[in-house]
Amino acid sequence: MIRVLFVTSEVYPVIKTGGLADVSASLPEALCQQDQDVHILLPGYPAAMAAAKSNGSVRKAQLRIGVHPVTLWQTQLPGSPVMLWLVDCAPLFDRPGNPYQNEEGSDWWDNAHRYYLFARVAAMMGLGQAGLNWIPDVVHCNDWQTGLVPVLMNSGHKRPATVFTIHNLSYQGLFSHETFRALGLPDSLWRFDKLEFHGQLSFIKGGLVFSDHLTTVSPGYADEILSPQLGCGLDGLLRHREHVLTGILNGIDTHQWNPESDPYLDHHYDVDHLVDKRQCRMDLQHQVKLEANSEAPLLGFIGRFVEQKGIDLLLSVLPDFLDKGCQCVILGSGLQEYEQAALELAKQYPRSLSVTLGYDEALAHRITAGADLFVMPSRYEPCGLNQMYSLRYGTLPIVHRVGGLRDSVFDSQNVPVKQANGFAFDRPEPLALQAAIERALDCLGRPKYRQQLQRKGMTGDYSWQVRAEEYIAIYRQILSDRQSIIQN
Ligand code: ADP
């Protein structure tokens, strides 16, 4: 049994801003199911402290990091067998808003200090310096917020093995040289091959340079980040570390996302009773106040309104399809210009376009079940989860063939028809998206072909089981490598 400390800045259902939270819940659970001893470490945000209070928690250690007293609480991740540790430091984490930003949407001014302290606690636990009787064999870090953990453990001779997973390379945790000094990091780390990145402190470089192994969330993205186009300025470093970089496609929580039993749905269906999916469509039309029309093809979009997700591409082609009698349901939030543009369009098409701004878990499930087609025109996509949710719900995905989207959605233009489960286009441009939507609409008019694609999608394996085994193989490999280093 391998003891794994899984260090993350968000975990579902406690606190979520994106796919990282989903993975941070379901991967540790899958690892536990395969008899590994996994504990999650999370900052003690208000939502986390509240969950701990209602679930029962135990105070495990009292630490002092710089001027800050820190309490380590142990509780259980709600609805999961996985142990959850919380880093309780009220001045840094007891704040409204989301983990990274205040209520106005600006980054917290002291994010470097917040995640440095979090990393210090993780490193103390990793090195057995937190006064606990549980010491991990592997510390598994995720994204820039945890990038300093491998750095802070690096000098320990008997340190645990380290894995760093890139969920999105474009968020790098960049701060000024002044901040680097204020954190008290040693000058020896201010080098282009350590933490310095074009005159700034880069948290993510800590993870990329100092971890024993790197993973990212799909094989496609693992290739793409080695290129200048999608390497975000770090492709050179990643090429240097390519021999320890593995792409593993994320799984999904197949209990939570199951059209047969989804508690957010009023009607359920499975691959042999697809007729009942129509009922979910009517429920959705009713809920978001679209015309109750059983003929109009219904498109869905869920996601952050940022350039990455290509919401602008969708909005640019949508009027044409709405004019032709399609309907569309959009859920998400983000940049004001995109929010404004979406709302404007919804005003013009009140009976066929619904836009909901904000985060709504229930509506996300109902769109996934009720839509006929799910659109993901992401310019880049490390993995993407919604396309897998859609596949499982018999909702045909239309995706830009990039990153994890190209590893999970297969178009008959690229693979034998029997393997196809959706529609993909090659360039993130309006015309290419438009052509793909047209092909998908044509498919809706051919029930047999549509069912064939739905069946392929709904019977695919999106579970974590095999993927968790791949992570375990990596843990074993790096543990044995470290063992030989310590012995020699
Ligand atoms: P990201 O780049 O945002 O992490 P992913 O596709 O990896 O994208 O994961 C996004 C997750 O967040 C999915 O579970 C998706 O359903 C969910 N999600 C995104 N926006 C919303 C929203 N507005 N309401 C509900 N769920 C959302």
Image (spheres, rainbow, N blue to C red):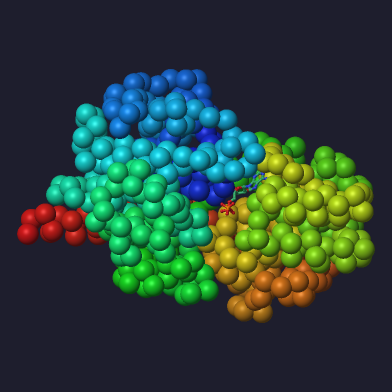
The quarter of the picture where the N terminus appears is top left
Q: From this view, report whether residue 424 is shown above or below residue 86.
A: below
Residue located at (40% from left, 31% from top): 86
Residue 276 location in percent, x, y?
77, 48
As rendered, which of 388 and 320 lies closer to the eye? 320
Residue 212 visible to an observer of this rendering:
yes
Question: Which residue is farthest front?
Answer: 178
**Can you tell which quarter of the image residue 478 is in?**
bottom left
Q: From this view, report whether residue 281 is shown above or below residue 395.
A: above
**Can you tell which quarter of the image residue 82 is in?**
top left
The quarter of the picture where the C terminus appears is bottom left
Residue located at (50% from left, 48% from top): 20
Residue located at (43% from left, 47% from top): 145
Residue 281 location in percent, x, y?
80, 48
Q: Is residue 308 shown left or right of residue 112?
A: right
Q: Is residue 487 shown left or right of residue 422?
A: left
Residue 127 location in percent, x, y?
21, 41
Residue 275 visible to an observer of this rendering:
no
Residue located at (30% from left, 32% from top): 66
Q: Is residue 332 shown left or right of residue 53?
A: right
Question: Which residue is farthest left?
Answer: 488
Residue 304 location in percent, x, y?
65, 51
User: How many tags in the picture?
Assistant: 0
Q: Is residue 42 shown left or right of residue 483?
A: right
As rendered, which of 196 and 305 lies closer to the eye? 196
As rendered, which of 304 and 14 lies closer to the eye? 304
